[in-house]
């Protein structure tokens, strides 16, 4: 079945479930071999660097798993000014970054007018850079304004493609259908689009994971963010078990085979639960890494989960040590825009 997946880049739901079950205890070397081979076929040994700027930890949503959820009153809230965001870009540009990722909670402070101004200023200052946004669910019109201002990519994890499971992770005013509409709207507007999900989130079954993979196959996004669920002490799921490195690697390998050309980050969450997590992810098909360019004072407050890997190895100032590690793993750090293969805006 793994050979079939490698050759055809698709499996039926029942076959996917079987592959997941067969790899629950240990990962089939063939799976790892084919996932790595697929990545190399399209992207070689390149690992694309993106500079992450966490613009705000204010959020109007109350997702049950998230440390910056609206009802968590223990969070020290912050939002970056336009000047602080531009300064982070300046630091990143000097370090060699040519993609900036502006990520934040759904913060009403950043009106369309403010965001368009920020995006167009970054684009005018750094025309050779890509701008990625990860700011949540917006209207079609808002997404269009962002795109026309110069944003290139948009990340919006779908979190769960099974309605019943999605509803167990989110408050009643959030709907999977709306999230799905947003993702298709983003594609329609012209963005390179990223979806993705947490592995090992509360109530998640093998069937749910298979549904997530099939949804990704159907959506055909350009980027897929997959990381382990990690509980946050100030949320409803504080006492839940974290997702495992093993299952996260399995989902990454399967995603690489289902979406051979996708850009797959080796996520911070994976590095947070295993010192070798990101290296393992790169070895089985991941090809993106996102060091943090946010002002150092704010980083600890952008805690979506507990024990987040930060400051030292995640800080962009230590980009040399991350690059060195990546070379030692046998990969090539790449600071170009790193677009989806054959992408034309």
Image: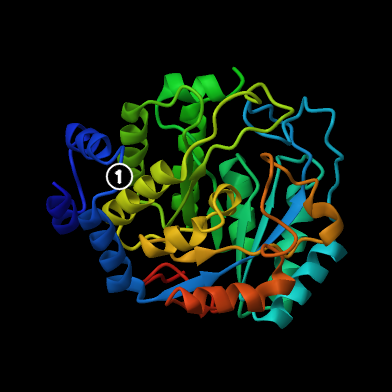
Residue 147 point in image, percent of width and height: 59, 59
Q: Is residue 189 left or right of residue 239?
A: left
Q: Is residue 126 left or right of residue 168?
A: right
Residue hosting label 1: 26
Q: Quadrant of residue 75?
A: top right
The residue drawn where x is 39% and y is 76% is 45
Q: Is residue 28 visible?
A: yes
Q: Is residue 266 visible?
A: no
Question: Callout 1 environment at 10 Å: few (<14), some (14 to 19), or many (20+)?
Answer: few
The residue drawn where x is 27% and y is 41% is 23
Q: Is residue 335 left or right of residue 218?
A: right
Q: Is residue 191 above or below residue 243?
A: below
111 and 302: which one is in front? 302
Q: How many marks?
A: 1
Q: Is residue 98 above or below residue 103?
A: below
The residue drawn where x is 49% and y is 77% is 328
178 and 274: which one is in front? 274
At mark 1, the secondary structure is: loop
Residue 319 point in image, percent of width and height: 66, 74
Q: Quadrant of residue 324?
A: bottom right
Q: How is the image coloured?
A: rainbow
The residue drawn where x is 37% and y is 37% is 212
Residue 64 point in image, percent of width and height: 63, 25
Residue 58 point in image, percent of width and height: 79, 39
Q: Is residue 253 above or below residue 233?
A: below
276 and 80: which one is in front? 276
Q: Quadrant of residue 289?
A: bottom right
């Amino acid at each position: 079945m793994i050979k079939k997946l490698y050759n055809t880049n698709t499996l039926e739901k029942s076959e996917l479930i079987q592959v997941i079950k067969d790899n629950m205890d240990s990962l089939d070397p063939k799976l790892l071999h084919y996932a790595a081979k697929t990545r190399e076929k399209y992207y070689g040994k390149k690992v694309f660097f993106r500079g992450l700027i966490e613009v705000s930890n204010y959020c109007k949503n109350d997702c049950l798993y998230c440390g910056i959820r609206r009802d968590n009153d223990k969070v020290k809230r912050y939002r970056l000014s336009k000047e602080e965001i531009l300064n982070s870009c300046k630091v990143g540009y000097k370090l060699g970054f040519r993609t900036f990722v502006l990520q934040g909670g759904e913060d009403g402070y950043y009106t369309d007018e403010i965001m368009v101004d920020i995006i167009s200023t970054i684009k005018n200052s750094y025309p050779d850079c890509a701008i990625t946004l990860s700011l949540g669910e917006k209207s079609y019109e808002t997404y269009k304004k962002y795109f026309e201002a110069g944003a290139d990519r948009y990340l919006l994890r779908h979190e769960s493609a099974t309605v019943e499971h999605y509803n167990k992770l989110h408050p009643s005013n959030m709907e999977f259908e709306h999230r799905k509409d947003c993702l298709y709207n983003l594609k329609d507007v012209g963005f390179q689009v990223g979806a993705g999900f947490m592995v090992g989130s509360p109530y998640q079954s093998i069937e749910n994971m298979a549904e997530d993979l099939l949804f990704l196959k159907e959506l055909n996004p350009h980027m897929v963010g997959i990381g382990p669920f990690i509980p946050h002490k100030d949320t409803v799921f504080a006492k839940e078990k974290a997702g495992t490195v093993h299952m996260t690697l399995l989902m990454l390998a399967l995603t690489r085979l289902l979406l051979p050309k996708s850009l797959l980050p080796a996520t911070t969450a994976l590095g947070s639960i295993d010192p070798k997590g990101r290296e393992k992810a790169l070895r089985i098909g991941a090809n993106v890494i996102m060091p943090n360019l946010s002002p150092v004072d704010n980083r600890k407050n952008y805690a979506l989960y507990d024990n987040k890997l930060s400051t030292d190895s995640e800080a962009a100032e230590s980009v040399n040590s991350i690059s060195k590690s990546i070379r030692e793993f046998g990969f090539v750090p790449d600071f170009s825009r790193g677009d989806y293969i054959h992408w034309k805006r």
